[in-house]
Image: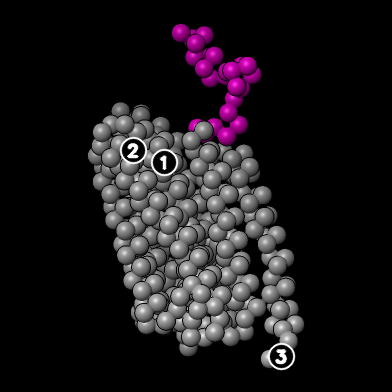
Amino acid sequence: MSTHAVVVEEGHGASAITFTKVWIGLLCLTGIEVFLAYEQAPVLIMLTALLGLSVIKAALIIAYFMHLKFERLSLFLTLWPFTVFCIILMLIFLGDAIRVPAMRPPL
Amino acid sequence: MSSHVTTAATPSVWEGGRSPYATNSKKFGMWLFIASDSLTFSALLFAYTFSRVANPNWPRPFHFSPSIIFSTVMTFCLLSSSLTMVMAVHAMNHGERKKAAAWIFATIGGGLAFVVLHLSEWMNLINNEHVSPSSNPWGVPLFGGTFFGLTGLHMTHVLIGVIYLGIIAQGIMRGKFKAEDVEVSGLYWHFVDLVWMFIFPLVYLMSVSG
């Protein structure tokens, strides 16, 4: 029984204490985000900080809660690089968004 | 016996060879769904961001109280439900079916709390700020369209997740599902949580009224 428990623990990589620590970390990061919104930081700083914190939170969720950290590297390499690449490609449209207000004819 | 073990450990190419991902097909299927759905949400988030950048007078209708406090509590509900979900997977891996079902019911509770709070937040916007999917007092109709489209699709995912987890919990209590089924449902639930980690800051926190 004890051997079985050890095998299961090894197979799934993390313990309940680790998951709780990750949860506390995620709550702390959310607290920082809300604090930034409360303080009304300048838009660019706010956007950079919030996106950075969101990416960290997403990485923690994917790595620990979704167990990807404990899966084979081939699974990660198959799934995520192309997804992230496609998401980054969408940035190409944002240049147009910046030009639109300047191109809009005056009323 | 010994020969059987050797064959099982290294199947021949004609038997499918070794699994390159060392995972079952259900889990791999869910991962592929998650990858494709993350592109859908990314496209919607980019549409929202595009509309926002292209409209200098984009509305900021979210007052710190109650909107941001509400959405922070909603975030807490989703994050906590992710913890209970991971505990359910953990319990199921240890063969504790009743405990796993109890953790899943706690997850469902977190999901339902999220939906109730989200609907009350929507009602606040619709009734008090007079925002609808096609119009609002600030004359930027795209705000309602993108906001309700994005958050509505996410809420639909949460509702589907609640139903999915309900089916899984019922099955566990009847001794039907295996640990891998709970893990696959957990992947879906964590994805719903993951998406909210981007919607909350980009839609709510970036639009707090001054």
Circle 2 residue: B92
Identify the magenta region.
Answer: B1-24
The residue drawn where x is 48% and y is 35% is B26
One can see residue A74 in this view: yes
Is B147 or B75 nearer to us in this picture? B147
Circle 3 — which element?
loop
**Image coloring type:** one colour
**Label 1 close to label 2 by CB (< 8 Å):** yes
Q: Chain of mark 3?
A: A
Q: Secondary structure at mark 2?
A: helix
The residue type indicated by label 1 comes to Glu
Q: Position of residue B171 (x, y in %)?
A: 30, 36
- Residue tagged 3: A106
Distance Cα–Cα, label 3 vs label 2: 63 Å
Q: Residue at x 68, y 91 (%)?
A: A107
The kind of residue on which mark 3 rests is Pro
Give the labeled residue for mark 1. B183
Dot 1 and dot 2 within a common chain: yes
Viewer-side label of 3, 2: 3
Q: Amino acid at mark 2?
A: Met
